[in-house]
Every structure is written in C-alpha cells, then in structure tokens.
Image (cartoon, helix red, strand yellow):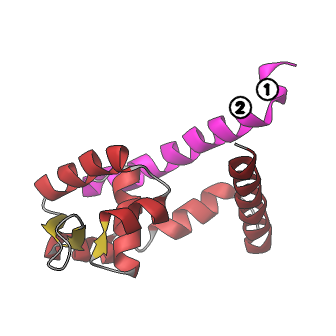
C-alpha cells in the first residue's frame, strides 16, 4: 500500500490542511487553533474544570495544562482551585477571552466556504469522521 491510499494519511493531511486555513484567521487575534478550541468550549459553558475541558477537547491533562497556562499568561482565561475540592481547577474566561467570541464570529463561514461542500454534505462528513474516531477508540 502506498501513502496516498492510506486512510490514516488522508485524515492526517486533512487535519493539517484545516489548521492551515484557520491559522491566518486566528493569528491576527493572537490565537492558535488549540486555544480557539478551548475558548469555544468555554464560550458554551464558562467556569469548567480542567477535567471537563479535557473531556470536551479529548486532551490529556499533560497537554491541556501548559496550553491553559499560556492562555492565562495572555490574559484570556483565569484558573482557580475549587472551593469544595482543591484538587479541581476551574477555568474561567477573562473579559478579553469573552470579547474574542464576537471577534471570531465570521470564522465558521470562512471555514465552510473553504470546505466547498454543501451543509448537508459537511454534516454527513463530520458524522462519518466522528463515527470512525469512536470505532477506532473502541478498537484501541
């Protein structure tokens, strides 16, 4: 089998291509793609624990914690130990992090246009990829 015929390479290279589309949209805002994903989760529900964020983003704590530390240093989020359980760390949006939601509002349309698919095709593709991911996790 040659590389272009492998599904793993198609997914890997599509992921990189997607991030290259996001990069010029996020760079003027001082954001990386992973930071944007964290913000999206917090815009949906602010004040989540690091564990909740990790589950939502499907990231391990050792990957997520340095990312959150950088975001805190940039003034995008604040981290605080839980009152009831000090082992838990809650992550909340700063005013700056909250304001970026409006500034990123047009990004979804840009990504949709770059994909060049009809909405129903894009939804079906997303669902197929998510199903594949779930089956691979179960097999792994």
Observer-nearest residue: 66 or 99? 66
Q: Main secondary structure of the magenta part?
A: helix
Callout 1: helix, strand or loop?
Answer: helix
Residue 19 percent location from the top left of the image: 50, 46
Residue 97, compared with residue 8, is above or below; it is below
Res 109 quadrant in image: bottom right
Residue 138 percent location from the top left of the image: 72, 52
Tag shown at residue 46: none
Q: Which residues are magenta?
A: 1-30
Q: Left or right of 134: which side holds 93? A: left
Q: Residue at coordinates 45% horizontally, 52% vertically from top-left?
A: 59
Q: Residue at coordinates 42% horizontally, 49% vertically from top-left?
A: 60
Q: Left or right of 139: which side holds 36? A: left
Residue 119 percent location from the top left of the image: 73, 73
Quickly name the residue at label 2.
9
Q: Are marks 2 and 1 in contact (CB under 8 Å)?
A: yes
Tag shown at residue 4: 1
């Amino acid at each position: 089998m040659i590389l272009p015929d492998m599904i793993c390479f198609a997914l890997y290279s599509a992921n990189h291509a997607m991030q290259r589309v996001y990069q010029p949209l996020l760079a003027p805002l001082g954001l990386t793609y992973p930071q944007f994903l964290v913000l999206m989760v917090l815009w949906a529900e602010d004040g989540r624990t690091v564990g909740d964020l990790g589950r939502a983003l499907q990231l391990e704590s050792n990957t997520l914690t340095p990312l959150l530390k950088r975001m805190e240093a940039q003034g995008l989020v604040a981290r605080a130990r839980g009152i009831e359980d000090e082992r838990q760390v809650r992550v909340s949006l700063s005013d700056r992090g909250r304001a970026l939601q409006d500034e990123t509002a047009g990004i979804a349309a840009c990504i949709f246009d770059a994909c060049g698919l009809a909405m129903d095709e894009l939804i079906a593709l997303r669902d197929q990829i998510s199903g594949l991911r779930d089956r691979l996790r179960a097999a792994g």
